[in-house]
Image (cartoon, rainbow, N blue to C red):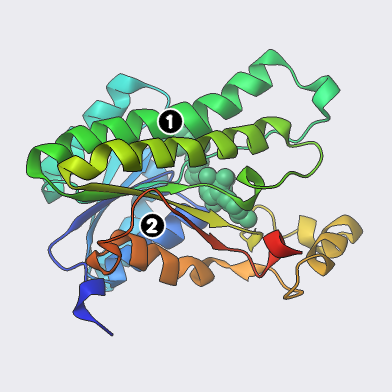
Amino acid sequence: MSDRFDLSGKTALVTGASQGLGAGFARTLASAGAKVALAARQTNKLDALKSEIEAAGGIAAAVSMDVIDPASVRAAFDAAEEALGPVDVLVNNAGIAVTKPFLEMTVEDWDSVLDTNLKGCFLAGQEAARRMADRNGGSIINIASVLGQSVIGHLSSYCASKAALIQLTKSMGLELARVGVRVNALAPGYIETPINSDFFHTPAGEKLVKGIPQRQLGQSDDLDGALLLLASDASRYMTGTVVTVDGGFLVA
Ligand code: NAD
């Protein structure tokens, strides 16, 4: 493997790191050599992951961050940088979905999804980019979704948020190239995690899996290649792009 994939000496911050894909991203970045700031609203939920990374020889710190609160975002970057040094890689992973028919979607549902999935990435992305620009280098990875490029029913606010996040990624990539900051999106397809696993064993879930050309769900570690590519210097000539990892879902 090219040593351009090596993250030794770099610091990465992952939002929403307490479970699911975010916890997986943190493990993967740590195993590639990065010091990892684990960010979540409740830091006590990060204790086990921090211990696990440290037991494997890695370096991690837990920081409190609510991505929809600008003061909390700023304080989390301060805490991460104090513990681990300047943040070189931001993974904007925190995200939520409200599953409801469009006609029943409330303003509160809409705001919670757009605030977390879009405004949260703007706030953390801007905070990271300002600091990275001062050092003329950094990589921001926005976790989008295939549902930012296609739609399914009952997820209108989620699909809209992820489509907007892809456009935000392109705008940030365009503007921040001059200051050495790269911004790309990673768009997963259907990835099995503890919170969605049960659904995929229902008739509706099984039908959905049959619609994926590879006829199987992705696993968290199927995102490792794209994550390490975008986080590392191996992608030094990539910005403003979307890397999709979906078993062929989007071409079906
Ligand atoms: P998850 O619900 O397991 O994890 C989401 C994390 O975000 C949780 O730790 C949650 O606490 C955190 N979070 C929510 N609101 C937050 C806030 N205001 N501040 C800080 N943290 C907050 O979901 P997941 O499946 O691991 O998804 C992670 C990301 O990947 C999301 O952006 C999601 O849209 C995206 N994604 C997931 C899949 C999939 O199949 N699992 C597919 C495509 C995209």
Q: How many labels does the image show?
A: 2
**Residue 21 horizontal/vertical position (percent):** 50, 56
Q: How packed is label 1: few (under 14 Cα within 10 Å), some, or many (20 or more)?
A: many
Vertical side of 190 occupied by 5: above or below: below
**Residue 125 horizontal/vertical position (percent):** 32, 36
> As shown in the figure, which amino acid type bears the numbered disc 1?
Gly
**Cβ atoms under marks 2 and 1 closer than 8 Å:** no
Does residue 210 appear left or right of residue 61 in this picture?
Answer: right
Vertical side of 43 occupied by 5: above or below: below
**Residue at image location 41% in from the left, 35% down from the top:** 121
Does residue 74 appear left or right of residue 252 in this picture?
Answer: left
First along the sequence among labels 2 and 1: 2
**Residue at image location 23% in from the left, 37% down from the top:** 129
Which mark identifies residue 120?
Answer: 1
Q: Can residue 66 be seen in this view?
A: no
| Image quadrant in which you'd find residue 5 | bottom left
Which mark identifies residue 136?
Answer: none
> As shown in the figure, which amino acid type bears the numbered disc 2?
Ala
Which mark identifies residue 48?
Answer: 2
Secondary structure at badge 2 equals: helix
**Residue 83 horizontal/vertical position (percent):** 13, 46
Q: Which quadrant is the N terminus positioned in?
A: bottom left
Secondary structure at badge 1 equals: helix
Is ligand 1 within 8 Å of the beta carbon of the residue shown at mark 1? yes
Vertical side of 123 occupied by 238: above or below: below
